Amino acid sequence: MARAVRRLPRRLDYTPGSYPATAVPSAPMLHLLSRFSYGVTPALVAEATAAGGQRAWFEAQLTNAYDGTAAAVADWWPDLKRSPLEIYARDLAGIRPAWQVMTDYVNRTLARRILSPRPVLEQVTDLLENHLHVPVNGNLVYPYRPQYGDLIRAGALGRFEDLLVGALQHPAMLMYLNAIGSTKAHPNENLARELLELHTVGVGNYTEADVKATARLMTGFLIDLTSGALTYNLAAHDTAPVSILGFTDTNADRDGRAAYVRLLRYLANHPLTARRLATKIVVRFVRDDPPAALVDRLAAVYLANGTAIAPVLRALVASDEFAASAGLKLRDPAEDVVNSFRILRANLVKPTTATSPANLLSTGAQNLGHAPFTWPSPDGQPQVAAAWATPARAAASLQLHTKLATLKYPAAIFATTATFLPPLPLAFRDLVDHLHRVLYQRPSTATVLQACCEATGVDPAASITSKHAVVGTGFATLLGALLDQPAFYQR
């Protein structure tokens, strides 16, 4: 009996297309914009080009304080402008649960990252709000959490010394780490320990005696239950002298707040704090394994500039280590959602219902593994790829991209198919190159082309006209394949 001959599929030529009519930025510009934004779009590239290049754009981002878009977004969720007492009372009365107000806060944060023309501010705020972490779901913290976030954002590009003083005296932080109600008879060491371990000098660089002395200096803070305001109980403050990591104070005043501030400023200017903060900045914006030489240089810049953050960022982007780090950072779940909305040109608007797109941002991030500000411990969410490069995260991202690629989910807020297309007819490989340039601001590769061909069943050399299914009913499949490319996950 003759055997059937099995036909092998013909070899396809996956040489990537070339569509130079869709211009892309230089590699250095793309790298800087990728690290300091939440998704590089043609509009952002045009803005940086008009500013005189990526470094000029970056400098303007550090010095231009006004952001009208973010101010407008702040009005989308009116409960976030209520006083802590109002938020608390409305929760108790069942008018608006606290968890919904905190979801508003996360949604507002993500909406700002999508829309704000000041992405550098949003990125640095993200870093510092995570460094000085107070979760939105902490017990009794929620009435104060919106104001705490506003404080971090307002000081993110200023001096860390000032930010630390504000954050470590804010009711949200004091309440979260049990400093409210701490007295000389029963000092609570929780905030004192985290101040030293997480916020300043770092683990292994202090003693238990330092923790105890810091806790005594923090005694006296209270919350007025009738007004919700932060108050101070003179009788509860421990007035014994303190010695903490070389800092000494007689602490003789019954009102210990001034001595506490002196300690905070001392710690902010400590060389160990400089190294700890420099390390966090390098991990966030350069690579997961921070080069020691770069950390040393940035710590020196931090101390030489009175703990100012902006000079540290300038030195970072001018470094050889930063230039060599393209492609080495991975987007976390929230960045995945924000980047999707940005590169698909979402027209995000004020929410009118619970299912409005702007009210689904937090849920989208949570579905991918983590919504901002929900990390359960004071150390804040991880900033390294290992935490997010998991099969579960990849599967969730694929599901999200499949929905978003329809350009109809979560609602009709995305650009139309026609907006993404070049003049047709065009070879499929060139169409893929054009779309990759539009989405990722870089040419396509053979791997990208092969993935798009296998997803759609279209030959690389096929001529794509306006009547072809791949730019009609099949466009969601093509767009989904492009959203699932490695370039999407690189920040």
Image (cartoon, rainbow, N blue to C red):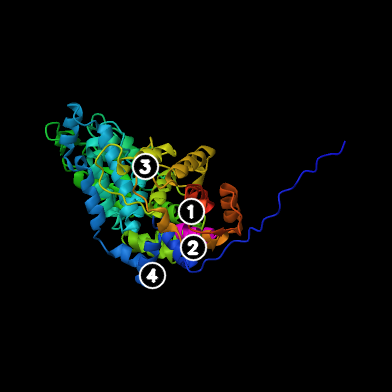
Kindly tell me whether residue 259 is visible in this rendering: no
| Whole-number angstrom distance, CA of label 4 to CA of label 3 | 32 Å
Q: Which mark is residue 424?
A: 2
Dot 1 or dot 4: first in sequence order is: 4
The structure residue drawn at horizontal position 48% and vertical position 61%, both measured from the top left corner, is: 437
Q: Amino acid at mark 2?
A: Leu
Q: Quadrant of residue 214?
A: top left
Left or right of 468 in this view: 125: left
Q: Amino acid at mark 1?
A: Val
Dot 3 or dot 1: first in sequence order is: 3
Dot 3 or dot 2: first in sequence order is: 3
Dot 2 or dot 4: first in sequence order is: 4
Question: Which mark is in front, 4 or 3?
Answer: 3
* Magenta residues, dominant SS class: helix
Q: Amino acid at mark 4?
A: Thr
Q: Which residues are magenta?
A: 432-444
Tag 1 and tag 2, C-beta contact below 8 Å: yes
- Secondary structure of residue under mark 4: helix
Left or right of 459 in this view: 139: left
Q: Nearer the viewer, residue 202 or 284?
A: 284
Question: Which mark is in front, 2 or 4?
Answer: 2
Residue 344 x %, y %: 40, 52
Residue at the spot of label 3: 410
Residue 29 x %, y %: 44, 66
Q: Residues within 10 Å of mark 2 (few under 14, many from 20)?
A: few
Asked whether 439 falls inside the magenta stretch, the response is yes
Question: Which mark is in front, 3 or 1?
Answer: 1
Q: Amino acid at mark 3?
A: Pro
| Whole-number angstrom distance, CA of label 3 to CA of label 1 | 21 Å
Residue at the spot of label 1: 471
